[in-house]
Image (cartoon, coloured by chain):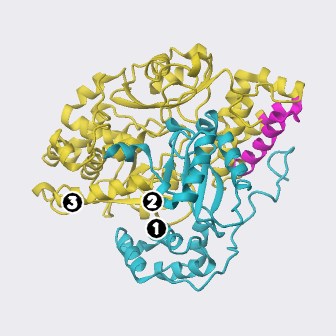
Chain colours: A yellow, B cyan
Amino acid sequence: MDPVLTSHVREPNGHTLGAYVARGGYDGLRKTLGLPPGQVIDMVKASGLRGRGGAGFPTGMKWGFVPKDSPKPKYLCCNADESEPGTFKDHVLMERNPHLLFEGCLIGCYAIGAKVAYIYIRGEFRHVMRVLEAEIEAARAAGYLGTNILGSGFDCEIYVHPGAGAYEAGEESALLESLEGKRAQPRLRPPFPAVVGLYGCPTIINNVETLCSVPLILTKGPEWFVSLGPEKNGGPKLYCISGHVEKPGVYEASMHVTMRELIYGFAGGIRGGRALKAIIPGGSSTPVILPDQIDAQASFDGLVKAGSMLGSAAIIVMDDTTCMVWAAENLLHFYRHESCGKCTPCREGTDWMLKILRRIERGEGSMRDIDLLNDVANNINGKTLCPFGDAAVAQVLSTIQHFRAEYEAHVREGRCTCPADWRVM
Amino acid sequence: MSFHPEMRYESGLHVSQREVRHEGEPFAFTPANRERLEQVAAHYPPEHRRSAVIPALYIVQEQQGYITASAIRHVAEIIGCTPAEVDDVVTYYAMFFREPVGKYVVQVCRTLSCALRGAERVTAEIEKQLGIKAGQTDPTGTFTLMEMECLGACDRAPVVMVNNDHWHECQSPEDAGRLLDALKAQGEAALSGCHLTVEKA
């Protein structure tokens, strides 16, 4: 498949309005403005576009949940928090193809009846914010934003809103809290944001890559979008490959692609020709899979079959020098740091799990600790308001499942049994 | 009794960290900064000015380096909410500093993708060169070293961010050492930026 989302990202000045319009940019918006909003939603539904942020929920269906008769203003929020460890795809889209995102936001706003879109971007992406703000000004000056867009009578504004370093702000209801100027903590649902969202108004939250896919559906048609991938997994997809590969990076492919093609084809194989030990296929929140699943299709449904999830398509590759207890400890440190503190099982449990993992990794653990770890993890799993709790235990449960012998060896030998020269031992 | 019979609640980690230790000098936005804040606040409905708390705190940090109790009260007054509501935000988000920091805040990403490519060794090298541990500021007040969680630059690991803004990617321990030397010698001119920004020209 030829890239469509990232086809021009390496061109100098490819991010500018002039370059974007020259390659047919904003044609999707023009077409949208001539259609009734309901028909735009129907086209997105027909494309089968599934959310690229992690959950894979059908975007058109989500848009359809917005109550049409509500007298309240409606909002679109673009989730550009991109904080899932291993994920770096939205960064390149925003910095190198920002008008595609704006066009997606405008089409989304038109479809749901919103007049404002907020791009909630993580605070560390300051250089990206500068690009977005400059290009928003360019788009406004050219009549693609503001009042009476392209003479259609449709008014819409896009604003960039910075986060300040909180993984949990990427969870959609926590994102809304953060956007309202509060701590990024999740809300109890129902009501869902499509009905009661930002400032209590109907709100749609979509990932950057999801919104970037929308203009393509308008210009090339839903059938084209469907035809790119396997059934129910249509459209182009960005994959982020990091860790022990020769060529880490963002690669665009259809979801027919397999993990083998991504790791050994696109990313050039394992660094130094070493052996593959484990793969985290969809960001740190998805269970680890083993090399025997390498031929799994890297699609929403293909990775569920392989025992994991596509998530944000962040593939972290680990070679045979990686200690899996250490890897689980590393990610638990992340989750303990990022737990928002609202739900007790997650707040306390992540701290406990990290303590137990540290004991085992340092060779101070006991065999009972391994079962205790499992037990604590299972007392967090499914017992929190948002999916963070399930995410936090994914690596612990899956590494114990697949690498229990390694945990036991740590306990038996009283040391890390898989040291590596790239760590500080 | 905690919800797991074998594990106890402890006081170390999640104790309320509400008190902001430093009262600081009496704080007020400069007229130019106040104007910038009002421009941002106009992005939100007037009855929801509280949405501008995070942007306001960034401006405080730009103006005086870190966030003090005095600044929190001022932000609350300008935004039209309570100091406790501002404090709530300051104490939650990782990018707000509640202690004075060095001229250069050097943060090393420690999460898995960076760690797999040697981030632990990068941190160790910087600690050695500066004679401080992660979380500390050197005696001259030039450098503060911190470890941070995933920056989202995993393809260019390990990555180091300076002053919440400038990214230095694909850092070996030697590269990180050279970055410190360059910052000492050339100041901010030594800061480059993300590879995408550099490629854009």
In the image, residue B100 sits, relative to residue A223, either above or below, namely below
Q: Is residue A201 left or right of residue A398?
A: left
In which quarter of the view is residue B67 placed? bottom right
Query: Percent from the top left, x then y, of residue A170?
Result: 50, 49
Are discs 2 and 1 less than 8 Å apart at CB? yes
Chain letter for the residue marked with disc 3 in the picture: A
The reply to whether callout 3 and callout 1 are in contact (CB within 8 Å) is: no
Q: Quadrant of the N terminus of chain A?
A: top left
Which disc is residue A140 wearing? 3
Q: Mark 2 and mark 3, same subunit?
A: yes
Q: Residue at x 54, y 16 (%)?
A: A294
Q: Main secondary structure of the magenta part?
A: helix
Amino acid type indicated by mark 3? Arg
Task: Give B23 or A34, whichever is nearer the viewer.
Answer: B23
Q: Which residues are magenta?
A: A346-373
Quadrant location of residue A146? bottom left
The residue beneath circle 1 is: B55
CA distance separating discs 3 and 1: 22 Å
Residue A162: assigned label? 2
Q: Is residue B159 left or right of residue B37?
A: right
**Residue A385 in magenta stretch:** no
Residue B12, above or below A364: below
Pick whichever, A413 or B83, lies toward us.
A413
